Every structure is written in C-alpha cells, then in structure tokens.
Amino acid sequence: MNSRKPLAVCVFCSSSGKIDRRYVDLAAEVGAELARRGHSLVSGGAQVSCMGAVARAARAGGARTVGVIPEGLVSVEISDEDNDELVVTADMRTRKGEMDRRSDAFLILPGGIGTLEELFEVWTARVLAMHDKPVVILDPTGVYEPLRELMVGLTDQGFARPKIWDAIGWTSSVPEAFDLLERAQPRIEFSPEDYAEAEL
Ligand code: AMP
C-alpha cells in the first residue's frame, strides 16, 4: 500500500569531489523527484558533491530542505546556508540522532565510509525493530553489488539473519526507490528466538 502522504525523506550520499559526474546528476534527479512527489528533504547540510546537489534540486522543485551538519564540518563540507533550516550540531553523533528524529524514511545513494556508516545504523535499527521507517538503497550503476554479495554471504553463513532483507529495499530505479519509501512497512518481529542456537 502506498501512503503518498508527504514524507521527510533523509538522503545519505557522497561528500566526495572525486566521483564521476553521473553520481552528482543522480543526486539532482533524486532531489527533483522528491520535490515532484511533495516530500521534504533531511540531509547532511553540506554544499559539496551529491549532498549539495540533492538539496539544490529539491529546493528548485519547491521542496523544503533541512540540513544537519556538525560544527566541525561547517567549513570543510561548506554548510549550505540556503537550506530552509540549517541545524549545526556539536558532534557527529548528535547530527545522526537529529537526522533520524526528523525523518520518516531513509534513502541511501552511492557514497563512501560516511554514507555506509549511516546506512548500517538505520538498517540495523530497523532489523532490531527499533523503528519502522523504510530504508532503501538506490544503486543504478551496481556500485553496491559487492556489498550486496557480502551481505548475502553473511546471511548464508548464519552471521546475518534472513530478516535483514525484510528491512531494506534495494533498487536501481529512482521512481521505484520513492515507491518503496512511500510503502507502509511490515513490522520486523524481533524476539529471543533470534538468538536461539541452530543445530549444527
Ligand atoms: P561520505 O559517504 O564518506 O562521502 O560521507 C557522507 C557524509 O557522511 C559526510 O557528511 C561525511 O562527513 C559523513 N561522515 C563521514 N564519516 C562519518 C562517520 N564515521 N559517521 C557518520 N558520518 C560520517
């Protein structure tokens, strides 16, 4: 079931200036689609790379944008003062908490260590039934295929629980990513059974 109600969509994406232009264009496409669907943006509050592109495109399409940036990154990642609201936090932990609190759904684009760290935090919390917010990876170029293979291998070997796949959407299409973000999510059941030992 698609909710189609306006969502605050948190986008995690690259801050790197060394990536192919198509990833910056992808971020802009995501910002434009977010605005077209009437959603608002929560992001890292920086002007650089994909982070800047998604926020600029979202605003150009009429969406409200909220940027959350730690004090220490204001000059490095160049805080985006055009955000409708710019929240400067004391540190990275506070930033992530603030982004979580303000968001209804999480969209992860290709990125580096910061993006991955943010992905695993929201994905893990959903597996542990600590929230019911959609978590969706958008990967049109297959840059995350090795990550998917790693997670499949970890699931096959019992390190990761099969339910991790109920807790994430994975797509190569921008419209499908938003369809997944707008869909009501099944509740992930989490119980002591999850820790029961398998007979090996
Ligand atoms: P990246 O994916 O590394 O280009 O970074 C995307 C965003 O995540 C940027 O705002 C980074 O500053 C931030 N970031 C980098 N490292 C971390 C980390 N360990 N925890 C949380 N955020 C990070």
Image: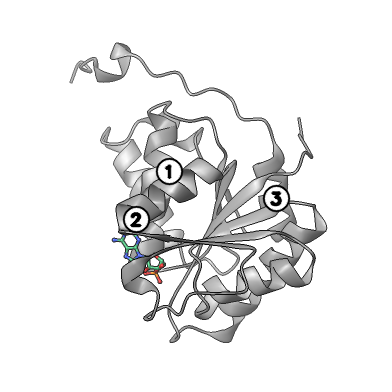
Q: Earlier in the sequence, mark 2 or mark 3?
A: 2
Q: Earlier in the sequence, mark 1 or mark 3?
A: 1
The residue at the point 32 percent across, 45 percent down is 153
Q: Amino acid at mark 2?
A: Glu
The residue at the point 65 percent across, 63 percent down is 84
Around disc 1, counting alpha carbons within 10 Å, would you say few (fewer than 14), some (14 to 19), or many (20 or more)? many
- Residue 114 visible, this angle: yes
Q: Amino acid at mark 1?
A: Val
Decide: is 3 above or below 138: above
Q: Is residue 157 left or right of residue 186?
A: left
Task: Tell me the element at label 1.
Answer: helix
The residue at the point 65 percent across, 44 percent down is 181
Task: Tell me the element at label 3.
Answer: helix
* Residue on which the image places disc 1: 122
The residue at the point 64 percent across, 47 percent down is 8
The type of colouring in the image is one colour
- Residue 173 visible, this angle: no
Q: CA distance from mark 2 to mark 1?
A: 9 Å
The spot of residue 199 in percent (x, y) is 20, 15
Decide: is 4 above or below 51: above
* Residue on which the image places disc 3: 178
The quadrant in which residue 77 appears is: bottom left
Around disc 2, counting alpha carbons within 10 Å, would you say few (fewer than 14), some (14 to 19), or many (20 or more)? few
Residue sitting nearer the eye, 164 or 126: 126
Q: Amino acid at mark 3?
A: Phe
Q: Report how many numbered discs are placed on residues in the image.
A: 3
Which mark is on residue 117? Answer: 2
Q: Is mark 2 within 8 Å of ligand 1?
A: yes
Q: Is residue 63 left or right of residue 86?
A: right
